[in-house]
Amino acid sequence: MWRVAGNLTRQQKIQLVNSLIHSRIDYCSALLVGIKDSDVRRLQKLQNSATRFIFGQRSRRGVTDLRKKCHFLPIRHRIEYKICLLVYKSLNNDTPGYMADMVQKRKPKAKCLRVDTDTTRLEEVHSTCNYKATERAFSVAAPKMWNRLPEQIRNSETLSSFKKSLKTCLFRMAYDC
């Protein structure tokens, strides 16, 4: 990619990175939930290298500010974005039935001292075995991620408004904006 970098505009470089790198990461994001930190660091290095390519930086200086300019979420937040997007689509019947069956809305508790008005939370599945792989399962990890989101994001009316508010929220979390 470096050979053609001089002939491309910054916008074309961003499109190239999105089509060749981010599409591959996003394709398997459900499998990346809960992976080891060393593996996340390897993927983050790949994204950092792609960011340097966009800006023509060959040095090893920090790329956080450059990633912010491109509006790239760090890898961990990118995975969370894709999982929450799948949950939103599942709850709105935009996914196959087997996906929708993996997430269930939480039922309000009948005998509770506090008022339970949040109907957007999901029932969290508590795994009965102590295997790390069980915690990585979509049916276990997705409700935890979804329930961490602010209620106003979970209540989004349209897919586009959900995407926008979710990315803004994750972007602020990632870069402390």
Image: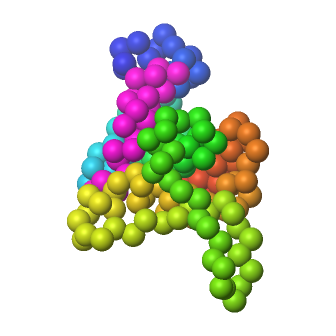
- Horizontally, residue 28 falls left or right of residue 166, namely left
In magenta segment, residue 168:
no
Q: Residue furthest bottom?
A: 113
Q: Residue at x 35, y 47 (%)?
A: 32
Residue at the location (50% across, 30% down)?
55
Where residue 86 appears, x then y in whole percent? 52, 43
Image quarter of the C terminus: bottom right
* Residue 95 at x, y percent in the picture: 53, 36
- 113 vs 160: above or below: below
Q: Nearer the viewer, residue 17 or 106?
A: 106
Which of the colour schemes (rainbow, by chain, secondary structure, one colour) is used? rainbow
Farthest-out residue, front: 110
Relative to 88, 1 lies left or right: left
Q: Residue at x 74, y 80 (%)?
A: 115
Q: Is residue 103 left or right of residue 33?
A: right
Q: Position of residue 89 (x, y in %)?
A: 59, 41
Q: Is residue 145 visible?
A: no
Whole-percent x and y of residue 99?
A: 46, 43
Magenta residues (range): 15-37
* Residue found 68% across the figure and 44% down from its top: 162
The one nearer the camera, 90 or 144, is: 90
The quarter in which the N terminus is drawn is top left
Q: Residue 68's quadrant in the figure?
A: top right
Q: Is residue 27 magenta?
A: yes
Q: Is residue 96 above or below residue 124?
A: above
Dominant secondary-structure state across the stretch colored magenta: helix
From this viewpoint, is residue 96 visible?
yes
Count of numbered marks: 0
Query: Which residue is at the front of the view, 6 or 16?
Result: 16
